[in-house]
Image: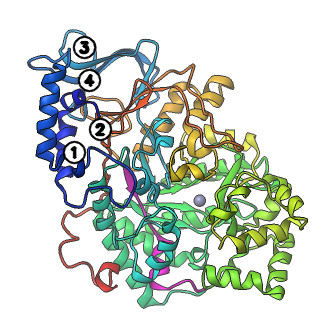
Amino acid sequence: MIVSDLFRYPDYWLHGAERLLHPAVAGAEVGFRQMPSRSDSGTARGWIAACTIAWFAWGAPSVVHATPVFDTVIEHGRVVDGTGTPWFQADVGIRAGRIAAIGSLAHLPARQRIEARGLVVAPGFIDMLGQSELTLLVNPHVPSKLYQGITTEITGEGDSVAPLDERVRATYGERLSRYGIRPDWRRFADYFARLERQGIAINFASYVGATRLREIVVGLADRAATDAELARMRALLRQAMEDGAMGLSSALEYPPAPYASTEELIALAREAARFGGIYATHMRSYEEDIMQALDETFRIAREAQIPVEIWHLEVAGPTMWGRMPEVIAKIEAARAAGLDIMSDLHAYTAWGNEMSAFVPPWAHDGGTTKLIERLNDPATRARIRQEMETRREGWDNEWLAVAGPADILVSSVGHAELRSLQGQSIEAIARARGREPIETLLDILVEDGALAHVAAFGMQERDVVVALRAPWVAICNDSAGTSPQGTLGLEHPHPRAYGTFPRILRRYVRESHELSLEEAIRKFSALPAARMHLADRGVLKAGLAADVVVFDEHEIADRATYAEPNQLSVGMRYVFVNGVPVIADGRETLLLPGRVLRGPGYRPGTARRNPAAGGAAATD
Ligand SMILES: [Zn+2]
């Protein structure tokens, strides 16, 4: 932070100073600095004094007026306001974290003016499936997101970050140890408080995941929940909604989630609906059973009377290619019948997920340890292999959804000694090892403790474009925020982690004209804000939160590739989050103005009162 920033963004400074005073803020556990640490300045008061002296020594910022009307005025830009309205030229004035005025503001005093002639000024982008709940604890700046223009992310896909009990936390802790993070939270209230103490660059919201509830209450077994267990899951869900979760989520491909019946999901969704929540889902199938999966989703929407977000809409596998128009028509028929169904996608033709998803669900019964045991048992391994090579019914068989092992890339691995596999295809690794590809994939699962992730090319671009153009489809990264630097830079993510939004602006707006600029921006902002009921974001309008991006529509582009994903997107000049720049003049400011956005069931202070009976926090 440069000293004059303290005066340009007084609200941020006051907010930041409060955080500095909190005893838990020192960044001791993670290796970043949000602002000068206590060891630098002793106390916040000492830091304020130091800044004041420095300010006088350096001289006051040149544009300070006695009574500035605005903190920032973005002048002469092409305003694309998020609603889909054609662009218009205007100045955008920001004050105290909000958009204060849009119009001709040249005559009004401001602390700072930004010349945006020829640049697009738009609402900050909303990532509908952000996956950064853990990486925000490693690097709260998540530059991969900032350089895409993302100012808000929604996350929590099935195995949400909370609640945690001791047992789940132990397995979770293993996954987190590579980041040096200790999961010290139990419920969302604790996790959100930790984020707020630490600071985050972007706004953040989460669903509570049905997978997590089931894991805590039922465990990892392939069986139905009893009535008593369902009651306990509902109590945990209530607690999460009161802590500020946005609704219920499911990820029905990943065990133990597939073991849940539709009735179980309806019961949970009803509970979320009572608090005004939304149901978001990674459906049971995006392959040959997608029509049944849509029917199940519609039934949940109808019987629980809940709005639905279908995550990462896709049709995968050669037998499904060309069938996206049928999927779109089916969702539009449901919408016409009164069901509030929307969706999102990342618009790449490769999906990205856990490599263990190649293995049929029954082999996950009991969790990862059991999965590895089965892969090490020759007879069971042979059965797994046989099903992967032949069986299509009842599960999304990803092995049969790609043309061959050359189309499966190992992205991130969990064990450092396997890092040389990152970015290689299963075919290439198999050739080098002199093994069959399918055996190689199963070997890697064993060697890496089932932590490896893949990018798999199983979609056709025409289907992607058909979905992208549907007016109710927004955008998701479906990848955690990351950075080319530090621990996170050692990973090899799907390029969507860095490139999703700029890639759509480059490829589908600028190059192929599949979308107009205004329609793309609407999908990035007003549409997802409406879906999430974020009434004060997503549109450039006086009074709304000042999440604003300024970019060059001719330059904006993704740089991340499958071979070299750790590359920031280009073309973003300014990104404001709650009125404070996280990118200014194309460079990161390292400020942390993001907020936790809490859902409609939020009841402040419930964490301090005796939590709901049976809650994870109450019992573990
Ligand atoms: Zn998913």
Which circle's residue, 1 or 3, is located before the other in the chain?
1
Res 343 visible = no
**Mark 3 element type:** loop
Task: Give the alpha-carbon distance from disc 3 to disc 2, as whole Å.
Answer: 20 Å
* Range of residues picked out in magenta: 204-221
Image quadrant containing the C terminus: bottom left
Please provide percent x and percent y for residue 326: 71, 50
Mark 4 surroundings: few (<14), some (14-19) or many (≥20) residues within 10 A? many
> On residue 578, which mark appears?
2
Direction from residue 442 to residue 484 in the image, left or right? left
Q: Amino acid at mark 3?
A: Leu
Q: CA distance from mark 1 to mark 2?
A: 13 Å
Instruction: Tell me the residue at 83%/86% (across/down).
Output: 378
* Marks 1,3: beta carbons within 8 A: no
Could you tell which of marks 1 and 4 lies nearer the N-terminus? Answer: 1
Identify residue for label 1: 16
- Residue at the spot of label 3: 105
To which quarter of the image does residue 390 belong?
A: bottom right
Q: Quadrant of the N terminus?
A: top left
The span from disc 1 to disc 3 (Cα, nearest Å) is: 29 Å
